[in-house]
Amino acid sequence: MLTRRFMIAAASSAPLAIDHAFAADDTSGDAKKADAKKTEAKTDKAVIVPPSVDELLQGAEVLDTALSPDGSRVAILVERKKGDKTTALIIFYETTGSDESIKPVQLGETVVDQVEWANEERLLIWVRMTKDAKGHPMGLYFYGEFIPIPVRRILAIGADGRDPVVLFNNQKGVMKRQFNLANVVDRMNTDPKRILMQIWDTVTECETLYVVDVYTGEAVHLERGSPSTDGWYTQNGVPVIRYDSNARGTVVSVLARAPGEKEWKLYKKVRRNELKKLSDLEFVAPTPEPGVLLMLSTDEGADMPTIRRFDTKSMSIGDVVSHDDKRPIQGVFVDESYKTLSISVSDDRSNHRFVDPKLAAHYKGINAFFGDECNVSPFDVSGDHKRFIFFVSGPRHPGAFWLYDLDRKDLRLLGDKRPWLTQERLAPMKAVPIKTRDGQTITAYLTTPVIASDKPRPMVVLPHGGPEVRDTLSFDLFTQALAAQGWLVLQPNFRGSGGYGKAFANAGRKHWGDLMQEDVEDAVAQVVASGAADPDRIAICGVSYGGYAALMGAVRRPELYKAVVSIAGDADLVESLAFSRSEDGSDSDAYAYWCKTIGDPKADKAMLLAASPSERAAEIKAPVLLIHGTEDTIVTPKQSKIMAKALKAAGKPCEHIEMKGVGHRDWSDDNWKMVLTKSIEHIRKGFA
C-alpha cells in the first residue's frame, strides 16, 4: 500500500531542488525573495485570490521530464522568465540515489520546449531561438511585412551535461534555410546511436526523412515524400504508413508499405477531424512484429471502437486486441519494445487499464493517493517496468510530473508545471447528470468559483467545439478564467458529442438547430432549478461549433441569455457547406461528412436556413461579440462577417474583432489574452 506520510516527505524535495538550482545562479537575492513570497502565499490561508488571466497564461515552469531507458536517471526541464529574459536549466536526478543526487545543468538565456533520452548516454533538448547572434529577431518578410518566426533546433548532450552537438550540423544549406529542424519521428530503439527526423525540404518542397547521429549531429537523407505528404508512421525507424492530404488538410490518403517493400499502396481515404485526428481510423502503436501495427477503428454497425492488429503487407485488419462495450477506447501506452502496458478509455477522468494485474494494483493505489479525482496518466516507463513517470492533472491541478518506484512503492513529485496555481485558488468542477426533455440522460460539468456565496450566481454556458468531441473533468483555461470572475461555468456534453460511442454522436446528425440546442437548454434549466444559478444573469460563449451553439442559443432563447460570445463560429450553415464543397471537393469524405452531420444543401435547405443564426439575427436580444482569425481554414472568417452584417442590418448590438494572421487553433498567448479579456469584458457588461 502507498503511505501518505512517506509520500508527503518525498514530494517536498524536488521543487526545492528546482528553486535552489536557480538560486545558485542568482546573486541578486531575487530568488530568496521569490521563495519568501511563495512561503507567505502558502501559509496565508485566510485570503483566497482566484488567478488572473495573466497568471493562467503564464508559461509553465516545469516543461517536461524524461526517464532514461533503464530508469536510472530523470531529466527535468525547467524554465523561468525574468522581464524579457528566459533562463532554462536541466536537472539530472539519479533515481537510485538520495535526494542530494541532483545535478543542475544551466542552459542560459534560451527558450526550451522538451527533453527526451536518445539512449542511456545522450539527451535530446528541443530549443527555440527568437533572435540571432546579433540580437536581431528571427523571421521573414512577407509582402513587405516582417513576420517573427522562431528557429527550432535539437541539441544533443551527454548525461553529464557535456559534449553538446546541434543535430543536422553537417547540412549547412538545410541549417541556413530551415526554421524548423526539431521534428523527431522515431527514436529507433534498435539503433541507439541514431534517430529518424522529418523536415520540410524547401528546395523540393516536400517532407523528407533523415537519419541523424545523436553523437555527431550528422544527418543522412533517407526518403522523400510527395508534395502532398504530411508525414509518416514508423516502426523501429522503418516508414510503414504515409499520410498525404489535400491542401486544407481535411481529407487524408493513408498509404501502407511493409518492411522491405519499395512502393506505397493506398489503403483508405479518410476525413481529419477538428482535433487533427483521422475519423474512425487511428494507428495507436507499433507491435514487436515487423509490419504489424495496432489500429483503432469502429467496425461497421458497431457503437464502440476496437483495437485490432493491422498488417501493412496484406493491408488487412486482424484480431481484436481490446474492446469496451460501454466506453470508447482512446489509445494504448507501450514500452520501448512496443509491448502494450495499458489501454486508455474515454471517461469523465483519464482511465488507464493496465494489462498486468500487478501494475493495475499500483495504478489503483496512485489514484487513491490523489483522492480518485485527478487524471493520472502514464508518461514514461523504464525498460524493466520498475519505474514510471505519471502526469497528474485535473480541474484544480494544472499538471505535475510524479516519479513512481514500484519496488519501493515510492511516489515523489518531480515538479509542478505552474506551482503558482495552487489547488485552493482554482475552481472545482463536478459532473452533473442531466435529464433531457425526451427522457434521456447526458453529462454536464459545473465549475463553481472558489469564493463562497449564499446567493445564486451568474452563469456562463460554455458548449464545446467539434461538435464530435467532448469535455471532461480536466484543467480548462477558459473555464478557470470565467470562474475567476465569480461566475458558474456549465459545459454540457450534448448529443452529437464524441467520446460516448457512435450512436450518441449520430443522435446529433442534422440536429444542430434543435436537439443539440435542447440538450444545452435542459442543462441550464436544471442548474437554475437547483438554485445555484441566477436566471437573470446567464451568458453563453463558445469556440468553433461552440460559437455556433452560442449564436443559435441566443436565437432560440433570446430572453435567457444576457451576453453572447462566438469565437470562430459558424453562422450560415448553407455557406458552411458551400465552403467545404469548394475547398474539399464535392466527392470528398470531408464534404460527405458535413452533409451527413449538418444537412444536405438541397434536400435540407429549409432546415439549414432555420438553423442558421445569420438568417434569424432579428430574434437575438443580447449583445453579441464575434471574434475570428483572418487565416482560419476550418471555419472561414466569412462566417463572422456574415453574422456581423446580419446583426447590424437588424439593428442589434454587435462587436466584431478579427485576429490578423491567426488560424482556427494553436493560438499564441497574446491571442488567448485578447480572447479571454474581451470575452470577460463583454459578459460582465451583459450581467451589469
Image (cartoon, rainbow, N blue to C red):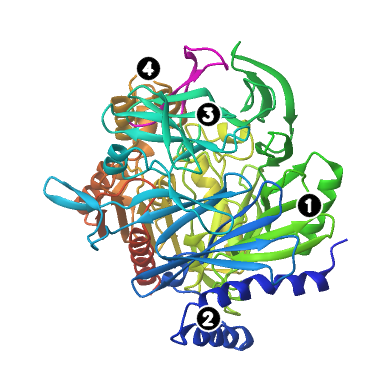
- Labels 3 and 1: the sequence-earlier one: 3
Quadrant that contains the N terminus: bottom right
Identify which residue is drawn at 55% across, 72% down.
421
Q: Nearer the viewer, mark 3 or mark 1?
A: 3
Q: Is residue 396 visible?
A: no
| 1 or 4: tag closer to the N-terminus | 1
Judged by depth in the image, the label closer to the viewer, 2 or 3, is: 3
Q: Nearer the viewer, residue 45 or 597?
A: 45
**Rendered image: mark on residue 49:** 2
Please state the horizontal and vertical placement of residue 551, each as a whole percent of the image.
Answer: 38, 50
Q: Which residue position holds label 4?
A: 587
Residue at image mark 1: 363
Residue 448 at x, y percent in the picture: 58, 69
Mark 1 or 2, nearer chain start: 2
- Measure how far apart labels 1 and 4 are at the Cα level: 47 Å
- Magenta-tinted stretch: 248-271
Specify few, some or many for label 2: CA neighbours under 10 Å numbering under 14, 14-19, or 20 or more.
few
Residue sticking out furthest to the right: 1
Helix, strand, or loop for circle 1? helix
Q: Which mark is residue 233?
A: 3
Mark 2 touches mark 3? (CB < 8 Å)? no
| Residue 54: percent from left, percent from top | 41, 71
Kind of residue indicated by mark 4? Asp
* Mark 2 residue type: Val
Q: Quadrant of residue 201?
A: top left
Do the numbered discs 4 and 3 sit on residues whose CB atoms are within 8 Å? no
Q: Nearer the viewer, mark 2 or mark 4?
A: 2
Please state which of the two labelled residues, at mark 4 or mark 3, is closer to the viewer: 3
State how far apart marks 2 and 4 are (Cα).
54 Å
Q: In the picture provided, is 356 more to the left or to the right than 613?
A: right
